[in-house]
Amino acid sequence: DVKVTQSSRYLVKRTGEKVFLECVQDMDHENMFWYRQDPGLGLRLIYFSYDVKMKEKGDIPEGYSVSREKKERFSLILESASTNQTSMYLCASSLGGIMNTEAFFGQGTRLTVV
Amino acid sequence: AQKVTQAQTEISVVEKEDVTLDCVYETRDTTYYLFWYKQPPSGELVFLIRRNSFDEQNEISGRYSWNFQKSTSSFNFTITASQVVDSAVYFCALSERTGNQFYFGTGTSLTVIP
């Protein structure tokens, strides 16, 4: 069974903290993604990575950075958490290449910034 | 501009009714891929189907069926004889041949009333 695992299901952080959200996939996928999900807005892409150490900004990268040092791991970093970053964060991975295969998602991390 | 539009924000049906979820997409690529995902209350997005732009054949999987029409840029999803377990948020998504990204609609929240 394919697996995308996010390190936390729920997180509560204080304003100004540096926050790390970790995601690991065991499918040897090239592509990994971080999305943010908010009511009425659907899934919005924050960043994606198509290879180790490679990254591209998505639609809403401001206030976030990412790291992909190993193929299986993709980290989302909130440099200085703010209350407007309270949201559900979803990590996904896909095979990549020319096949445009489906993305597999983790269980999500619900982050609350107080 | 929104690449994927799901105009229905919320739908409620009574158990055993049929329901169709609409999805309209926009792309200039001649090769592209369309997807449907289900997000139950637990939060994890579950992949349902992937279609490529060259395959307009309708697909049926149990109570689920999909109608892909390039002429109207639509990829609609029908659930026949709905059940309470079908209650979830459903997302339609587009992936273009020229990129690695997935573009998601804003989702349709389906409630099946017993």
Image (spheres, coloured by chain):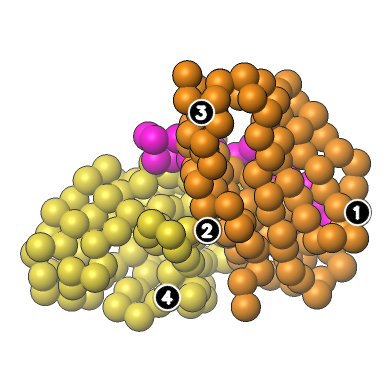
Q: State how far apart marks 4 and 3 are (Cα).
A: 33 Å
Looking at the rendered structure, the kind of residue marked 2 is: Thr
Q: Is residue B85 above or below residue A69?
A: above
N-term-proximal mark, 1 vs 2: 1
As drawn, is A4 to the left or to the right of A109?
right
Judging depth in this view, the residue of A109 and A114 nearest the camera is: A114
Colour applied to chain A: yellow
Q: State how far apart marks 4 and 2 are (Cα).
A: 15 Å
Looking at the rendered structure, the kind of residue marked 1 is: Phe
Q: Please give the label number shown on residue B54.
A: 1
Q: Which residue is mark 3?
A: B112
The picture places residue B83, in percent across and down from the top left corner, at 56, 21
Looking at the rendered structure, the kind of residue marked 3 is: Val
Q: Quadrant of residue A41?
A: bottom left
Q: Is residue B101 visible?
A: yes
- Chain for numbered disc 4: A
The kind of secondary structure element at disc 3 is: strand
**Residue mark closest to the camera, 1 vs 3:** 3
Q: Which chain is orange?
A: B
- Chain for numbered disc 1: B
Q: Quadrant of residue B4?
A: bottom right
**Residue mark closest to the camera, 2 vs 3:** 3
Q: Determine if marks 1 and 4 fall on one subunit.
A: no
Q: Please give the label number shown on residue B82.
A: none
Give the residue displayed 50% in from the left and 47% down from the top.
B10
Q: Quadrant of residue B100?
A: bottom right
Q: Which residue is mark 4?
A: A60
